Image (spheres, helix red, strand yellow):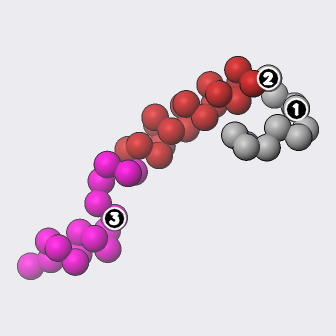
């Protein structure tokens, strides 16, 4: 959505607001925690 504005259905401000929300509320929280596989690799007892 960020790279493709071909349809121009949404305004650039709406797209930027949506992307900021998705990054701060979905992407960043997932990035800041270990994946279950990583947890198993390094913390499995």
In terms of sequence position, does the residue under pointer 3 or pointer 2 come before the other? 2
Check if mark 1's residue and mark 3's residue have beta carbons within 8 Å.
Answer: no
Provide the residue designation for mark 2. Answer: 11
Q: Does residue 32 sit above or below 14 in this rendering?
A: below
Can you say which quadrant of the picture contains the N terminus?
Answer: top right
Main SS, magenta region, reads helix
Left or right of 41 in this view: 20: right
Secondary element under disc 3, as helix, strand or loop, is: loop
Question: Could you tell me which residue is drawn at 39 percent across and 51 percent down?
Answer: 30
Secondary element under disc 2, as helix, strand or loop, is: loop
Total count of labels: 3
Check if mark 2's residue and mark 1's residue have beta carbons within 8 Å.
Answer: no
State yes or no: residue 32 in magenta.
yes
Question: Could you tell me which residue is drawn at 38 percent across and 44 percent down?
Answer: 29
Residue range in magenta is 30-45
How many residues crowd mark 2 within 10 Å: few (<14), some (14–19), many (20+)?
few
In terms of sequence position, does the residue under pointer 1 or pointer 3 come before the other? 1
Provide the residue designation for mark 1. Answer: 8
């Amino acid at each position: 959505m960020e790279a493709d504005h071909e349809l121009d259905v949404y305004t650039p401000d709406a797209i930027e607001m949506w992307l900021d929300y998705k990054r701060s509320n979905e992407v960043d929280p997932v990035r800041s925690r270990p994946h279950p596989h990583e947890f198993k690799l390094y913390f499995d007892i």
